[in-house]
Image (cartoon, coloured by chain):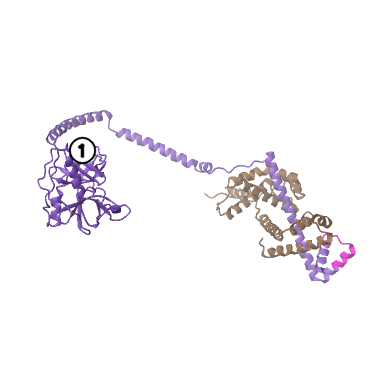
Chain colours: A purple, B brown
Amino acid sequence: MEEMQLLDAVERYLNNEMPADEKAFFEQLRKTNPEVDQLVVEHSMFLQQMDRFSDWKQYKATLHDVHSELLETGSIQEKAPRATVVQLWKKYQRVVAVAASIAGITALTISAIAYYFAPKPASEIQLLSRELANIKRTQTITDKKINALTGQASTRFIPPADPKSGGTGFLIDGKGYLVTSAHIVANADSVYIQNTKGDYFKVSTLYVNKQTDIAVLKIVDNRYQPIKNLPYALQKNLADLGEDVFTMGFPRTSTEIVYNKGYLSAKTGYNGDTTTYQLAISANPGNSGGPIFNHSGEVIGILSGKQTTAEGVVFSSRTRNIFTALHEIRKDSTNEDRIKLLLPSSIKGLDRIQQIKKIEDCMFMVIRY
Amino acid sequence: MRPDFGLLLINLGINNTVYVKTDPREIALLEGLAKDDRQAIETIYKQHYNMVQTLIINNNGSADDARDVFQEAMIVLYEKARSGTFELNCLLKTYIYSVCRRLWLKRLQQQQKFVSDIENVSETVPVEDELEAHGQRNTEFQMMEKAMQHIGEPCRSLLEAFYIQKRNMLDIAGHFGYTNADNAKNQKYKCLMRLKKLFFAAYKNNTP
């Protein structure tokens, strides 16, 4: 409370609001009491600071006012900063000018040199005509050669490129009957087969059964040389679980035959299908229609597909389905095809390499168009 | 070839500051500033703002920068006028140009935009000392402003009403809802003590 009164007194003293007698008393107090004197000095400085601060604030406010007022009346205008491009242009004007002249002179010089050293147009035309005559002469020679060649090799037949799909097929009768998967030749415009030597033969589809995935094809090409004795046989009984099996097929686009082996992993196929076997063998698109042989070279089935949701599960149609197919072909009285069934396997007891060598010639790549 | 003496003397003459007696009309303007005459501010603004704006914009600045710099120069001028000095010893234009150029250089340095120098399009006078004094006062004002912000309401409004708007205690008591002038005085005293404490703490360290 005392301090407050003292400060009030200081303020009144500094503002000259004190009556004369009080002022005299206060000045006396100031002289005798250094603390009071100190307070007066400090507060005086502070009040001055406050005064100037208030002036400063007011002045700043006025400046802002004036600025916006003058902007409105248009006495001053705010300019946008100059674009850098303009600044750069001003700065490098001279450099650009020099560069442009150098470029111009260089261009002129080069075109002059090019014109001077370039060969004259007339001679060039002469040269060309002579060359043209040369080309004409060689062309006629080539034509003659080609004609000669086509005369010789007219027997070789190559069907159009771009097949729809392909698979594998194998002979069941050396006269020219093959078995393959039904899904390979289904909806085909035409079907060709190609042997491992690269020769093409046209075939017709004799029989298709989509349920058992079996198709019987007949070679209708007269260039085909019948094979007298097929090395392998068709198995009459059921195959045994765990039996070693092997297959051959054309999963590649070339006629390179690919061998694979595995074992019979279940006597029934997908969801207990009794017309198929389940195999553990590696198979790829193109292997479809390939024969499944047991160790003695008997065909136990025809490879038809694999389960996409499981690894290494392949299904094959049973050989029995071929017998059914042949039976049905025979029943059709209009059909004059008499397919002779295979003799007992002649490759039984041979080692695998020998077996493959014998089988190879009876394997064909089936191409659907 | 060595330059002869005559030439040397002429060169020296140009380099030295040429003192020019200030135009009486310009002295009148400064007197107006000291008296918070709005007309004087407007006149100086109209005459010199565009020059400063051109200077700033040609040296990597914006219109906002130009306004800030020019207003700070106006404050320097105001302080000079308030201190009772109306003699600039050069044209007002030269003075404003010199101050603004100096201020802008300093600001560019603070922004780390190192510029070798602002090219001089008109002559300048040395203003370093004045700007140093101005910088000190600026710091002090910032201290006060910060202290004011720190004491909070209603202290701030109360002290502003008393010390800046210079209203009397009775009026303030009515306005702020105190029952009598003594109550208001009491409150004002408490606020003032807090403000002084904050201000002098900053003042000792000389940092706002």
A167 left or right of A20? left
Magenta residues, start to end: A13-27
Image coords of residue A24 (percent x, y)? 88, 66
Residue A49, above or below B123: below
Q: Is residue B87 visible?
A: no
Labels in figure, total: 1
Quarter of the image that includes the C terminus of chain A = top left
Residue at 25% in and 29% down: A125
Tell me if mark 1 has few (under 14), some (14-19) or many (20+) residues whose alpha carbon lies within 10 angstroms of its own. Answer: few
Q: Is residue A321 magenta?
A: no
User: Which percent across, then down, holds residue B69?
Assistant: 64, 49
Pick the residue in front: B192 or B87: B192
Three-letter code, disc 1: Pro
Regarding mark 1 in the picture, which secondary structure is present there? Answer: loop
Residue A243 lies left or right of residue A102; in this view the side is left
Residue B78 location, x and y as percent?
72, 51
Residue at 85 percent across and 69 percent down: it is A28
Q: Which of the chains bears the disc numbered 1?
A: A
Specify whether residue A21 is painted magenta: yes
- Chief secondary structure of the magenta span? helix
Task: Give the camera-side residue of A223 and A162.
Answer: A223
Whether residue A346 is visible to the viewer of this picture, yes or no, is: yes
Most foreground residue, B96 or A239: A239
- The residue at which mark 1 appears reads as A159
